[in-house]
Image: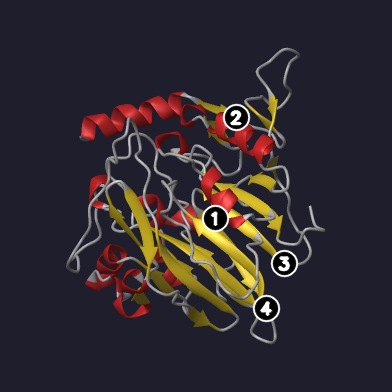
């Protein structure tokens, strides 16, 4: 299995291409006739009004009325081949925005590229944050030397569930919100797409607390993958913005939230571009269900040993081009944005 992992990742790195804002598959000065296509890449900074910052990989940062919400931050991004992993303290210090007001960290699954940097960020940079995620993430964060067990809440037991009986799947359990200040969120059972050729290379769960942080990539087991429905609340406690966040592609109905009987639509859908070709109808079925005004695309760039000071590189082997073309032609009322790491996206329709 380790050999398969290495070969797959070597292939992906070999297929990476540099990007410039607005273009995919181009050098900074594309020549006539080159393989360039207009795509929704953006690199905006210092935007006014409500906004979200893309941190790279599956990470996002929101600030709502002085209360921070952090989604799966990942900066260490070890080089090839990632057999052994550890948090890169210098990269985190260099690139992590100010997160001292973060109260909530949402973790969709426990792979290293979603959880590896969380312990250090909680210890040094977000002292008031509570992490919410699946049982496996909790067992990893319970490593005694971290002193974080009391700052983790398992929301897997409260998630909106998917039940499958061949050949159909259905959802059950009432919606259960967790409210923290001006933010509330709901965990939804999701699914992790296969990494390569229909194989999930890092599946599995933990059922008891770990004694030490995993060293090998294969030991960062995913656990039950979660999606989240997130409401940013106004002064009256009503949802001003509704956001759907998913950190891995999935087959329907995994990741689908319940219908909320308050008349509020989903404003922003955050999807994962990696491995979309390994599942069925993603994100198309979810877009038809949610009808979001904006689609933010994450986990689209090559993050193996990348330099966040340079334009990002696209993983061509993931076949994002077909997915982006399909969305742009089939969902014309949804604005699609694929932001550069560390850039911003406005939540309001009247902002860029």
Q: Earlier in the sequence, mark 2 or mark 1?
A: 2
- Name the mark nearer the viewer: 1 or 4: 4
Q: Earlier in the sequence, mark 3 or mark 1?
A: 3
Q: Nearer the viewer, residue 45 or 60?
A: 60
Q: Is residue 229 above or below residue 323?
A: below
Residue that label 2 marks: 18
Residue that label 4 marks: 65
Q: Earlier in the sequence, mark 3 or mark 2?
A: 2
Element type at marker 3?
Answer: loop
Q: Earlier in the sequence, mark 1 or mark 4?
A: 4
> Label 3 vs label 2: CA separation?
30 Å
Q: Residues within 10 Å of mark 3 (few under 14, many from 20)?
A: some
- Name the mark nearer the viewer: 2 or 1: 2
What residue sits 65% from the left and 56% below the top? Answer: 292
Badge count? 4
- Answer whether residue 133 is visible to the viewer in this image: yes
Q: Left or right: 254 with respect to 270? A: left
What residue sits 62% from the left and 67% below the top? Answer: 242
Residue that label 3 marks: 50
- Answer whether residue 55 is visible to the viewer in this image: no
Element type at marker 2?
Answer: strand
> Label 3 vs label 1: CA separation?
24 Å
Residue 224 location in percent, x, y?
31, 59
Residue that label 1 marks: 94
């Amino acid at each position: 299995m380790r050999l398969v992992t290495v070969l797959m990742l070597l292939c992906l790195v070999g297929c990476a291409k540099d990007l410039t804002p607005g273009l995919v598959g181009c050098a900074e000065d594309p020549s006539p006739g080159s393989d360039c296509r207009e795509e929704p890449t953006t690199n905006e900074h210092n935007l006014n009004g409500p906004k979200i910052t893309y941190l790279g990989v599956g990470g996002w940062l929101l600030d709502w009325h002085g209360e921070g919400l952090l989604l799966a931050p990942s900066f260490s991004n070890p080089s090839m081949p990632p057999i052994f992993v550890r948090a890169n303290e210098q990269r985190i210090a260099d690139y992590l925005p100010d997160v001292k007001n973060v109260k909530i960290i949402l973790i969709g699954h426990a792979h290293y590229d979603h959880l590896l940097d969380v312990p250090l960020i909680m210890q040094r940079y977000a002292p008031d944050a509570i992490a919410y995620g699946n049982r496996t993430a909790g067992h990893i964060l319970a490593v005694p030397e971290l002193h974080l067990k009391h700052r983790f809440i398992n929301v897997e037991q409260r998630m909106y569930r998917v039940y499958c009986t061949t050949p159909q799947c259905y959802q059950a359990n009432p919606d259960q919100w967790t409210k923290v200040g001006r933010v509330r969120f709901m965990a939804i059972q999701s699914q992790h797409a296969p990494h390569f050729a229909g194989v999930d290379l890092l599946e599995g769960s933990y059922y008891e607390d770990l004694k030490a942080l995993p060293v090998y990539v294969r030991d960062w087991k995913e656990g039950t993958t979660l999606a989240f429905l997130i409401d940013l609340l106004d002064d009256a406690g009503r949802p001003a913005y509704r956001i759907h966040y998913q950190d891995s592609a999935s087959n329907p109905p995994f990741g689908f939230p319940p219908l909320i009987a308050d008349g509020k639509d989903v404003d922003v859908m955050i999807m994962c571009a990696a491995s979309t070709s390994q599942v069925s109808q993603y994100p198309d079925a979810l877009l038809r269900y949610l009808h979001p005004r904006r689609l933010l695309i994450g986990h689209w760039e090559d993050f193996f040993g990348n330099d966040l000071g340079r334009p990002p590189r696209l993983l061509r082997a993931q076949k994002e081009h077909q997915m982006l073309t399909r969305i742009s032609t089939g969902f014309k009322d949804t604005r699609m944005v694929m932001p550069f790491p560390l850039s911003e996206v406005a939540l309001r329709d009247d902002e860029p």
